[in-house]
Image (cartoon, helix red, strand yellow):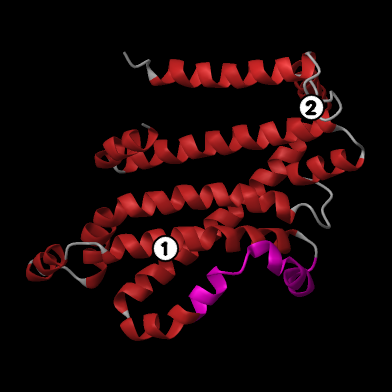
Amino acid sequence: MQLPRPILTIAVFAAVLGLWWAASTFGWVNAFLLPSPSKVFNTLIDLAQSGALARHALISLQRVGLGYALAVMAAILLAVTFSRSAALRNLLDPLLEFMRQIPPLALMPLLMLWLGIGELQKVGIIVLACFFPIFLGMRGGIAQVDHKLIEVGKVCGLSHGEIMWRIVLPSSLPSIVVGLRIGLGYSWRALVGAELIASSAGLGYLIVDAENLARTDIVLAGILVIGVIGLVADQLLKWGIARAAPWLASDLEMARA
């Protein structure tokens, strides 16, 4: 008999929490390296009451939101353009493949020289991290659309824009959704790296500053907050997709299984 998913999820998290508590309580791991769950929880409360947690979290959310939105817009524009222009696709493909192999954080020194050490540099890192998963998902989805459907659209007198909006995009949504979710996860990974250098606010800065102060409890608190926010953001993305495209609800449920 298989347990319901919510109960199974709670059980897994409870088991991890119990193992964490046992490791710190019975001295399996040095308490300095792994503070107890209660200490981390009290640290979270202190950060929340002081307003520091909300301030850092909001700044990080703004950076991720802006970078992710820009990456989605750029990926949609380029994927649609590639689907309509084979010449442009053949011209730019080698360059894009070259850029895709370069880790975004490796470009951080260059972006700092070009964009400074302000918000543009941090948002730029997030855009670079998000763009390729979203772009490849959209491009792959568009390429897999049944050409017979497109021919039917042409016979019915639909314009190129109508074919793209009413046939191509709905048919390619499963692949697009995968790219959107992977890109959203990458945005949080890139955020911490972007906030490691020349930053005075954000969850990444909070973690690095705590490391310099040897506050492992704050480091863990920051990591937990990023994980929770990322999980909530992914659930909101799936909820929004299910509302906008109800026929994908079963695919999203299968992805959870």
Which mark identifies residue 34? 2
Classify 87 as above or below 140: below
96 displayed left or right of 20: left
109 displayed left or right of 70: right
Q: Is residue 244 visible?
A: yes
Which quadrant of the structure image shows residue 115?
Answer: bottom right
C-alpha span from label 2 to label 1: 39 Å
203 displayed left or right of 157: right
Residue range in magenta is 95-116
Label 1: few (<14), some (14–19) or many (≥20) C-alpha neighbours in 10 Å? some
Of label 2 and label 1, which has the lower sequence position?
2
Amino acid tagged 2: Leu
Q: Is residue 51 visible?
A: no
Give the labeled residue for mark 1: 136
Residue 3 lies in magenta, yes or no?
no
Amino acid tagged 1: Leu
Which quadrant of the structure image shows residue 39?
Answer: top right
